[in-house]
Amino acid sequence: MYVPRLQTARLKDLFRTFPVVVVAGARQVGKSTLVRKVFGERADCVVFDPVQDVENARRDPDLFLDHRSPPLILDEIQYAPEVVAALKRRIDRDRKPGQYVLTGSQQWGVLRSLTESLAGRAVFLDLEGFCVAEVARAAHPRAWLERFLDDPTLFLGKPHRRRPLPRSLYEQIWRGWLPEAQRLPLRTVPDFHAGYIRTYVERDVRLLADVSDLQLFGRFVRLVAALTAQEINFSHLGRELGVTPQTSRRWLDVLKGTFQWFEVPAYHTSAARRATGRPKGHLADTGLACAAQVISTPLALGSHPLLGSLFETAVASEIRKQLSVLSPRPNLYHWRAFSGSEVDLVLERDGILCPIEVKAAAHPSGADARGIRAFREAYPRQRIGPGLVIAPTERVYPLTDRDYAIPWDLEA
């Protein structure tokens, strides 16, 4: 059964405005499914292959496009990079919107070439795994974060409900957010994740990066899974595996380039240098992180030392997904002072900062907002809005006169 996606309305709007829309994201996040659902009845579709030259598109891209009239979906465009230049020539002759939809699973390589070649002609939409509303199979998924940013006081003063999710918090984190993992029986989810990781390491990494030791790279993936929601220390990563910091940095770039890893930069101002400057890194899917750490069941996750980090990663990923439908997209940071005070996420829009803490606790208290208070004290001249402590709690309620507990699965 098709699950309506949060990005649907934005995808349609971009297609009505630009000649080319590029839908990018990790493998199996639903790019092809979304595009075909939205445009399938009125657009032809070609799926490129890493081995076969489909319709001689790589050998003669102009002839290939001559026989395929817009609107046209070009799926897995990274396997036919030669088509990009031919597309550019066509778009330069005719800038009419709604001509091509491209999908791809890599940020670098072909997609980087797309960014350069189709500058001003194409717009990019990044698709990730399911968000909370999509897991709940909402008929019209919406982002509560947009309403909060528009008017925090009005939003926090209204009654709210939690999304009726089909499973517990532990099981959702353990399954992760890839669409396929939602429908599988519990006993086969580890097999799905193991196959995903194996295919990724053996296929994508071999195609994309000069990694001579794939077994060592597999150990690297397991290591960064254990370090999700932590600040990135390339020297530490290198020492753990016996490689140089430069190698660990390059390998993280491989993970980012295939949408398996994302980073949240550190927030600081030139007037306040008492904050660290390291970004915080997250494995993009908590289910893959659990598989890499061999967490066997959802119940085992409940007593695992990584529970707090995995919950933070789940919330950070959810925030990113909700921000992806906003234009312009607010800036997202984390903050940590050398004193040890920290805030997991800081949103910035229209010159206003919104500090967010993430706590894997059912009943957060005022003490859980102490990092937010430290953030306000560090930046007394900044415009700082209400602080949020996102947790698996039942309702929205005040923690201080300016900070609120809020359920992680809030309904918009």
Image (cartoon, grey):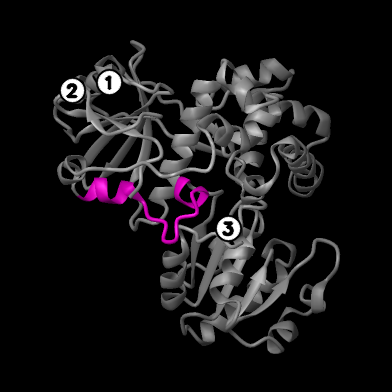
Is 237 situated left or right of 152 in this image?
Answer: right
Residues in magenta? 132-150
Residue 400's label in the rendered image is: 2
Q: Which residue type does callout 1 highlight?
A: Ala
Whether the residues at callouts 1 and 2 have beta carbons within 8 Å, the answer is yes
Q: Nearer the viewer, mark 2 or mark 3?
A: 2
Q: Earlier in the sequence, mark 1 or mark 2?
A: 1
Considering only order in the chain, which callout, 3 or 1, is on the residue closer to the N terminus?
Answer: 3
Residue appearing at x 26%, y 50% in the figure: 147
Please name the amino acid that badge 2 sits on: Thr
- Disc 2 crowd rating (10 Å Cα; few below 14, some 14-19, many 20+) is some
Residue holding disc 3: 24
Q: Secondary structure at mark 3?
A: strand
Rate crowding at label 3 as few (under 14), some (14 to 19) or many (20 or more) other CA atoms within 10 Å. Answer: many
Q: Is residue 139 one of those drawn in magenta?
A: yes
For numbered disc 2, what is the local secondary structure? Answer: loop
The image shows residue 95, relative to residue 376, as above or below, that is: below
Task: Looking at this view, name the residue that lies furthest to the right.
Answer: 52
Q: What residue lies at 66% left-to-right and 72% top-to-bottom?
A: 74
User: Residue 177: x percent and y percent?
Assistant: 57, 43
Q: Give the quarter of the image for residue 221.
A: top right
Q: Identify which residue, 102 or 111, lies in the foreground.
A: 102
Q: Sequence order check: which comes first, mark 2 or mark 3? A: 3
Left or right for 378, reference 338? left
Q: Position of residue 127 (x, y in %)?
A: 53, 55
73 horizontally vs 203: left or right: left
